[in-house]
Image (spheres, rainbow, N blue to C red):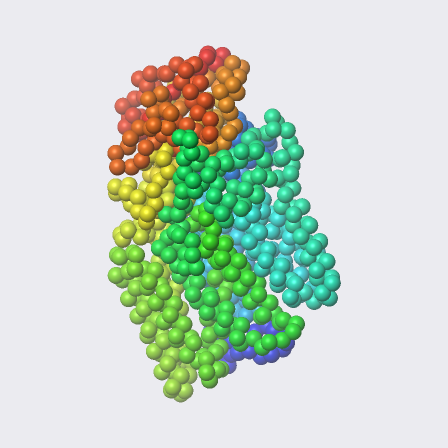
Amino acid sequence: MISEPLNPARSTSGEHVRTISLSGSWDRVGLATVLILAGALNFYGLNREGYGNTYYASAVRSMMQNWHNFFFNSFDPGGFVTIDKPPLGFWLQVVSVKIFGFNGVALMLPQAIAGVLSVALLYYLVRRVFGAAAGLLAALALAITPISVVASRNNIIDGTLVFTVLLGAWAVTRAVETGKLRWLLLCALFVGLGFNIKMLEAFLVVPACGLMYLLGARIGWGRRIAYLLVAGVALLAVSFSWVTAVDLTPAGQRPFVDSTTTNSELDLAIGYNGLQRLTGRAAPGGGNRTGGNRGGATAGPPGGFTAGETGAAGPLRLLNTQLGGQIGWLLPLAVIGFFAAAVQSRRRWPLDDRQLSLVLWGMWLLTMGVFFSVAGFFHTYYLVMMGPAIAALAGIGLVSLWTAYRSSRWGWWLLPASMLAVAAVQAHLLADYSSWARWLTPLIVGLCAVAALGLVIAHFRPQLGVRWAIPAVLLGVIGLLSAPAAWAETSVANSSSGLIPSAGPSASGGGPGGGVFRRGRGGFPFNRADFRPRNGFRPPAGFAAGSFRGARGFGGGDATANSGLLSYLEKHQGRAKFLVATSNAGTAESYILSTGKPVMAMGGFLGNDPILNASKVASLVKHGAVRYFLLPSAVDSGGAGAEIPGIVRTGGFGGGRFGSNSGVTTWVQQHCTVVPSSQYSSTTSRAAGAGSGGFGGAEALYSCGSGA
């Protein structure tokens, strides 16, 4: 149980700093409870999430078929084009589906496990320096961080990245304590593996790890700098090993690298998955992300593709309507906690363990906070990378504030004041969720107000002591954790998977619907019932309603192919390598998931990649590699598009003009024959959306040659 007097936490200086101590077996019981909670949130109802992100699910199905697809991270079984990320996280999914079969649970299992392990590892990292109470609070905060829960319940690989970089943080702490190079090299290895999960996003932890080692390693300054240089070389070698191997492979012997114009993994790493995330100025395939259409051809998503998802850049972006509910609930407490813990540490050199831990988590939070506040192009689930730092500093901060309350004549008021301040911020975040705010805001404010009042009374009535103060603190902690816990529970209770998952209910006021492109949920940034854009977001031209609702194309959870069309293609494929060719991955993925057969996404993910031109398509047809093309019909070509009342035109972006070359569609329309829809569309399949695809509007099936 919680005991008094308060025991000292570990400090290299030997200074006895009073903190909360958990006696006997309560430490282990508390950890087991938190891990059970994390497991429940990560694993419960995974079978309801479908395939999650069907773009990546298609790639895993393709990669499990042969070593060529596996190594090169192929989107399609035919090895035509890659996906837009490196392979390590998906290799783990391939292993999982090889063991448990190809299904949604197997796809998400590695991320769910990584999420629980991250909670355990964060507990260890905080506990060893600040004590068991701080470790348990940090672990609990991470376990219920809404976006962390969502990432653990999806086949996106950001949760796996978090666990990998936390291993890097563990290794660098050992390097600081021992001064040995091998631990620093192990840190470089883990971060390098993280690069092979999500590319430059992994490098966001490098400033924190590097600064901690530079300021704290138990060796001379010369050796510190030399070791950091060696570790930097090792980091680059591990990070770019797979990238180099792919780029050194002749282009004709591997898939085209998606989301590039140069067919280069290095370009993908530095460009689309690197600097372009910060600047937000370029779209996959080289289009201008902020410039919209040029010369009548749609080069990529129009300006602000993720603006409605992330909100405008600025210092308060992480507390806005779009992002606050994902990661912002405990952010003020983390900032307050950092300064509270820093003030309690005496200025000394060399830095002790507590100060070095604050350097690690403080720089982690600062680096990522700055990046996500100014970045022009990222998705909500990327914020999972901030989770460990916010959770660690929240746990450390609560214990530090308690210490100040118990031992400082001038700082006793910080704990009750901080609880009220954080509760006020949470009430502000809840203001956009009317039905939730009606009961959750009074709960949070009420609990924190009662806790603050109890702490004030206990301070001025010393005879009450900790018997009054500790229950008050626990009441306040329950209040501060109520909102993130509610957001996490809502995400579990209601399917949160999809192309771009996010946590919690819809900011439009009522029921569930936080994530974009979800199966069975309204989803951000669209209201569920009427598909109206909200929060100022406008979908790019070419997105059809079915794409957002998950019935077809880039949907969430399930990928449903047109059964009549699928049957027709399988019957008439002949000896052609590819079952069908489509303009983008959104149309192709449902057929890959349904059959496991090669389906060609001629323009890559969004239809923008300059992979083919008319002459190459003619050659493919001539040599019998592909016979059928599922493309916008002639009436919908040329970027004009068919009108979907009240929504958007469906030409252009992945539609009539995919990529920067409309000649491919034109060639097919001029040299091939339209297959009458009556030959493959039944009444049922037409009702299910036959003839419309991922990012396009009306589509037609074209037959080119015999395929024999």
Measuring 57% from the left and 65% from the top, which residue is drawn there?
Answer: 359
Residue 35 in sight: no
Measuring 27% from the left and 53% from the top, which residue is drawn there?
Answer: 509
Which is more toward the observer, 504 or 298?
A: 298
Reply above or below: 497 against 678: below
Q: Is residue 168 left or right of residue 445?
A: right
- Total number of numbered discs in the rendering: 0
Q: Residue furthest front?
A: 295
Spot occupied by residue 527 in the image (x, y as percentages of width and height):
29, 45
Which is more toward the observer, 5 or 161?
A: 161
Spot occupied by residue 361 in the image (x, y as percentages of width and height):
54, 63
- Residue 177: which quarter of the image? bottom right
Measuring 39% from the left and 75% from the top, which residue is drawn there?
Answer: 416
Residue 503 in sight: yes
Which is more toward the observer, 636 or 562?
A: 636
Spot occupied by residue 440 in the image (x, y as percentages of width and height):
30, 62
Q: Is residue 644 left or right of residue 669?
A: left
- Residue 582: which quarter of the image? top left
Spot occupied by residue 160 in the image (x, y as percentages of width and height):
52, 49
Reply above or below: 589 against 306: above
Measuring 64% from the left and 55% from the top, which residue is drawn there?
Answer: 187
